[in-house]
């Protein structure tokens, strides 16, 4: 029973990631603020690679996009991190992380899940400011 549940969970995550990856070239950026007339110099851009799904920004549920436009200031993200072992995808967990965004900067969410050692796996989640080439939240392994 446990094996079936794990297998179904892995299949669901795998299908979600395949769908997201196949749509990634056509998915427009989502603006997370109401003023749709802001210039790019007035907001920051946030991106997540395959394997990291942004579920919420500032407690607001989001649709999937390849990029999110956010206002400058502090933001709390709730993300789902997945990993691959061979061709099999599995959910690593949901993680919260906060950071301060600066207008005109590009941020990438990065993740790494290590193999189980002593029955424990390690999960890493961090945010990089691509504009400044620096880690602004979390810990890069």
Image (spheres, rainbow, N blue to C red):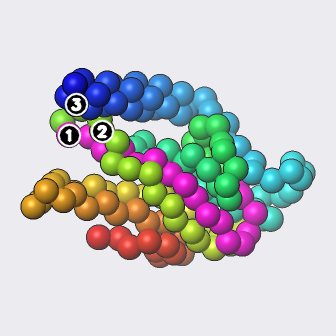
Q: Which residues are magenta?
A: 69-85
Query: In which quadrant of the rendered image does the N terminus lie?
Result: top left
The earlier-in-sequence mark between 3 and 2 is 3
Identify whether 81 is placed above or below 42.
above
Is residue 49 visible in the rendered image? The answer is no
Q: Which residue is mark 2?
A: 90
Magenta segment: does it hold 115? no
On the image, which quarter does residue 112 sit in?
Answer: bottom left
* Residue occupying the point 80% across, 65% down: 42
Q: Would residue 38 be found to the left or right of residue 67 on screen?
A: right
Task: Determine whether the residue tagged by mark 2 lies in a helix, strand or loop.
Answer: strand
**CA distance for labels 2 and 1:** 8 Å
Is residue 132 visible in the rendered image? The answer is yes
* Residue occupying the point 67% across, 72% down: 74
Which mark identifies residue 2?
A: 3
Judge by depth and name the residue closer to the eye, 126 or 5: 5
Q: Which residue is mark 1?
A: 85
The residue positioned farthest toward the left in the image shown: 118
């Amino acid at each position: 029973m446990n094996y079936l549940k794990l297998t179904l969970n892995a299949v669901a995550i795998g299908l979600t990631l395949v769908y997201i990856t196949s749509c990634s070239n056509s998915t427009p950026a989502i603006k997370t603020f109401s003023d749709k007339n802001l210039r790019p110099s007035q907001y920051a851009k946030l991106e997540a690679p395959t394997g990291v799904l942004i579920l919420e920004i500032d407690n607001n549920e989001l649709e999937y996009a390849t990029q999110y436009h956010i206002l400058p200031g502090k933001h709390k993200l709730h993300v789902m991190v997945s990993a691959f072992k061979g061709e099999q995808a599995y959910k690593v967990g949901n993680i919260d992380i906060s950071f301060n965004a600066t207008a005109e900067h590009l941020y990438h969410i990065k993740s790494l899940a290590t193999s189980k050692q002593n029955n424990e796996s390690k999960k890493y989640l961090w945010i990089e400011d691509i504009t400044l080439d620096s880690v602004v939240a979390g810990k890069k392994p």
